Amino acid sequence: MKQEEPKFKKLVNAADGLSLGISMVVAVLIGVGIGLGLQSLTGAQWTLWIGVFIGLGAAVNNVYIAYKRQKKSLDELANDPRYSYKNNQALQKKYDSEDDDE
């Protein structure tokens, strides 16, 4: 039995591909839209600020997620043996000894 994909999966994947700056602006705009919707439903002026804070929180969360993703990528590079300091020293000694043989 094939599991059904989430309804907004394509939207989430598309948003993931956006640059960080654009995704921050979009998060704040969506939050303002939520606030305006709450304001029109309730008639209370202060509910707009709830949406603004939701949007700002989402923007900060986007920055944090991007940071975690970048940190994970850099940690994988740091642990890659091709880029380790010891491996580079051994290669340098190998090339130096080959030059001495000539």
Image (spheres, grey):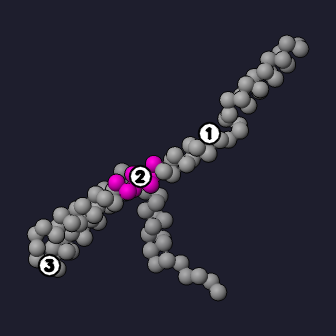
Q: Residue tagged by mark 1?
A: 78
Helix, strand or loop at mark 1:
helix
Amino acid identity at mark 2:
Tyr
Q: Which residues are magenta?
A: 60-67
Helix, strand or loop at mark 2:
helix
Q: In the shown orientation, is residue 20 left or right of residue 48?
A: right
Quarter of the N terminus within the rendering: bottom right
Q: State whether residue 3 appears in this view.
A: yes
Of residues 32 and 46, the one nearer the viewer is 46
Of residues 5 and 72, the one nearer the viewer is 72
Q: CA distance from mark 2 to mark 1?
A: 21 Å
User: Where residue 46 sits: x, y (%)?
Assistant: 12, 67
Q: Residue tagged by mark 3?
A: 42
Of residues 101 and 51, the one nearer the viewer is 51
Establish if 46 lies above or below 1.
above
Quarter of the C terminus within the rendering: top right
Amino acid identity at mark 1:
Ala
The answer to which of marks 2 and 3 sits earlier in the sequence is 3
The answer to which of marks 2 and 1 sits earlier in the sequence is 2
Q: In the shown orientation, is residue 1 left or right of residue 65?
A: right
Amino acid identity at mark 3:
Thr
Q: Residue at x 45, y 48 (%)?
A: 67
Quadrant in the rendering for residue 35: bottom left
Q: Residue at x 31, y 59 (%)?
A: 57
Quadrant in the rendering for residue 101: top right
Q: Residue tagged by mark 2?
A: 64
